[in-house]
Image (spheres, grey):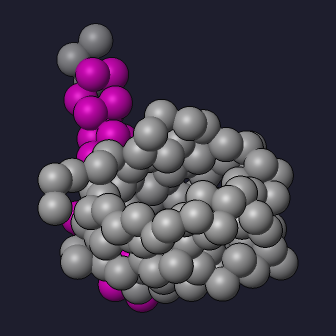
Amino acid sequence: MKRTILFLMAAALPLMSADPKTVDAVKAAERAWASATVKGDAAALKNLLADDISYTHSNGETDTKEVFIGNLTGARKYHTIEFESLDARLYLNSGAAVVMALGRVETSQKGGQVNAARLRFVHFWIYQNGRWQLAAHQSLRLTN
């Protein structure tokens, strides 16, 4: 029993000797997501987002992949996503990663006023289909 518990605990820990190139690849995917989101680049986002992504905004709304990408063409416009901090941790033999970030985001809704927000967000990335894909997004609005 003790061995099983120790094994499960060890499996849940990040790989302390993770390949820096893999960490850099996850961070590059994170920056590519930010760039594609601001540009409204549907083709890039179709590759970057997992088909079953759960994308929960800071207001509690949760989008599917199709809804998130579709909203970028009118309902929601991202004007900027600028990282203040960006940390990536690898898990499961580098097949999964958690990114914790702090950033400034400017958005507008349906062509309205641009609103700035400081957000803390967590992204869960998985390596599948030969690339890193964002499987979950959750953000929290902070006081400016």
Residue 44 found in image quarter: bottom right
Quadrant in which the N terminus appears: top left
- Asked whether the viewer can see residue 13, the reply is yes
Residue 68 found in image quarter: bottom right
In the image: residue 104, left or right of residue 62: left
Residue in the image at 27% along x and 22% along y: 5
- In the image, 139 versus 27, the foreground residue is 139
- In the image, 53 versus 18, the foreground residue is 53
Secondary structure, magenta segment, majority class: helix
Residue 129 found in image quarter: bottom right
Q: Residue furthest front?
A: 112
Image coordinates for residue 127, horizontal then vertical, percent:
62, 64
Q: Which residue lies furthest to the top in this view?
A: 1
Image coordinates for residue 54, horizontal then vertical, percent:
62, 41
Chain part drawn in magenta: 4-23
Image coordinates for residue 60, horizontal then vertical, percent:
48, 34
In the image: residue 140, left or right of residue 24: left
